[in-house]
Structure formats: C-alpha cells, structure tokens
Amino acid sequence: MVPEDRLDEIAARFEFIEAKMASGAEAGEIARLAKEYSDLRPVVAEIVAWKRVRAEIAEAGAMLKDPEMRALAEEELPLLRDRLAEYEQSLRLSLLPRDAADSRSAMVEIRPGTGGEEAALFAGDLLRMYQRHAERRGWRFEIVSLQESELGGVREAVAHVEGAGVFARLKYESGVHRVQRVPETESGGRIHTSAATVAVLPEAEEGEVDIPAGDIRIDTMRASGAGGQHVNTTDSAVRITHLPTGIVVTSSEKSQHRNREIAMQVLRARLYDLERQRAADERAADRRAQVGSGDRSERIRTYNFPQGRMTDHRINLTLYRLDQIMQGDLDEVIDALTADDQARKLAEMGV
C-alpha cells in the first residue's frame, strides 16, 4: 500500500509552494521554489489520478449491488484495479529519496586496466560504445581529453556528456569492465582476458565546489602523442595537482587556456564526487551493496566476444547480443540496473 499520509504531505507542500510563488517571494527564493514546484507537479498529478481511480473503484463496487449495472461493474473493476496498481507503483517510486545529481550532466573517465595493449584497445571500444549510446539518447558527447596508445587504443579518455538526466543513466557504468576475446595481436587464436576502468562523475557547477588558489599547483609541459612523440613545440599541456587530496588532473589539447578549463572542470567533478562518496559512506555502512554505488574497484561486467555475451554481475543479467551493446544499445542493461536499484530502496523503505 502507498502511505496516504505521505501523499497528503506532498500535496500540501505543493499547494503551499504554489501559494508562496503567487504571493511573490524574494528573487533568490523564487528559483528554489520553482525547481521544487516543477519536481512535485507530476507527482501531485499522479496523486490526483490515483485518488480518482480509487473513487471509481468504490463506485463500481457499489454498482455490483444493482442487477442492471452488475455486468458493467464486473467488466470495469479489473481494468480499474490494474490502473490503480500502476499508479501505486509509480507513486512508490516517487517517494524514493532523490539523488540531487541525477539530473546533471556527467564526466566519463576511461582507463585501461590489466591486459597491456589489449586493455587499451578495449578502453577505446568502451569510449566508442558510450559515444554511440549518447547519440541514441540525443545527448551531447564531447571528448575533452584523449591519450592514445601506439596501436590506436586509449591510455586515458575523459568525455563530457551533456543532457537531461545523464548521470541518472550512466552512474551504473562506474566500475571494472572485463573483456574476453582473441586480441588482434594474438597469432595463436587464444582468448585473453583484460579490463578497463570506467568512472562516471556528476558534473559540478562552477562555484559549487570551492577550490582556493593555494590548494592547487599548476604545471605546464609539452603535449605528447602515442609513443612519446611530441605533437607540438609549445608548453600547452596542463597538469593540476590538488594538494589537500593529491588528485592529479592533466589535459593535453593544443590550447593551454582550454587545457586549464578542462582540467579545472574535471577536478571540480572529482572533488564533488569525493564529497558525495563521503556523505554516502556516512549514510550507509556498506555502499557496495548498492547497485549505483560507483565503486570503481568492483568488477561489474564481462564482455565475452566469442560467445557474443555480456554479463552484468551485480544483477546476474546475461544478454546474448554483444554486437548491439557495443554499438551503444545499453538501454536494456541500464533499465534493469535502475529497476533493481529502485526495488532495493523500496524494500529498505518498506513501501
């Protein structure tokens, strides 16, 4: 059952905000109230619809006593009960605690793990997979930093993915991705196992994360390409070290000014994510039990190319359509992870 007292609280809060905005709040408060009003509006609409269906069920129940209306009531009741169940499930989900970062864009960092050059090639495959997925979703995908290996793999890649609800969808991708396949460099046809690490960080807005000038050290150096060959002769690459945490961010594009912007953007995202993780650790003793924990040391998925199989180990989901997945068709996987995460949270709340 849906807790009616909680629904009444939401409806009352919505009416209060509506009245407050109509009476004229201060400029700074208006923006905050407008955001909350926008978030509550669809929930309140579902509450109204849920109450209407319950009233219709009561009316149909009363019609059962009328011989002339009984057949019509018996026909309508199952449909109304199904509709009520749909509204109740939707309302349960709306009661779940909201992650304030879900609506944000994200920074996606990809690095090869164990496996040498094959791991770097797989990291490149993952980068293209997310790029294609972003295109499918209508998101803007910008590679802001890319270091390639000698064979065209990826030593490190950072991408900015911009769009509505990007982090809510991609946050489940953080972790170790393992690949099993015959490498291009393998002449004997043996299957190798290698890995790459993905980190998805919610984008932090400028001014949201305070980074005093004294907390960072900025070094410039010559940008270099695969194999250490210099791609230009100016000191354009930028490395920023955050002294309190030891976090190091580099950017090696052609423009030093742009590199500073990129490096600071990534640093803000990492510091914002660090604070989020610290807060989550305080709320939950074992974050690894949560699907969306973002634990980058956890092996989350295996891509087995000989069998055309992808397995997500967190929810024991196996799909035999690896080709489509590598082409960016990730919706079925992400939808399953989202549903599992929601089910866990609903069970914890007891609703």
Image (cartoon, rainbow, N blue to C red):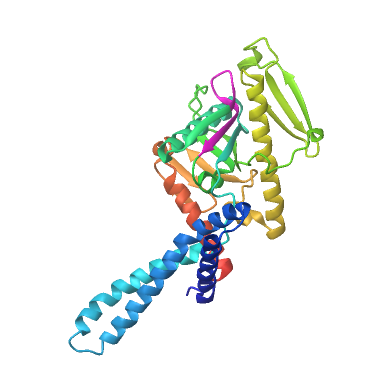
The x and y percentages for residue 81 are 34, 74
Q: Is residue 81 left or right of residue 244?
A: left
Residue 147: say if magenta.
yes
Q: Residue furthest front?
A: 23
**Most foreground residue, 82 or 117:** 82
- Can you say whether 126 is above or below 56 in the image? above
- Give the image location of residue 150, x and y in percent: 58, 18
Front-most of 185 and 321? 321
User: At x 67% / y 57%, what residue is drawn?
Assistant: 286
Prevailing secondary structure class for the magenta stretch in the rendered image: strand
* Residue 272 in the image, given as x and y percentages of width and height: 68, 44
Up the image or down, 274 lies above or below 109; here it is below
Measured from the top left, where is residue 82 in percent x and y?
A: 34, 70
Which of 114 and 127 lies nearest the eye of the viewer? 127
**The image quarter in which residue 299 lies:** top right
Q: Which residues are magenta?
A: 145-162
Q: Is residue 228 magenta?
A: no
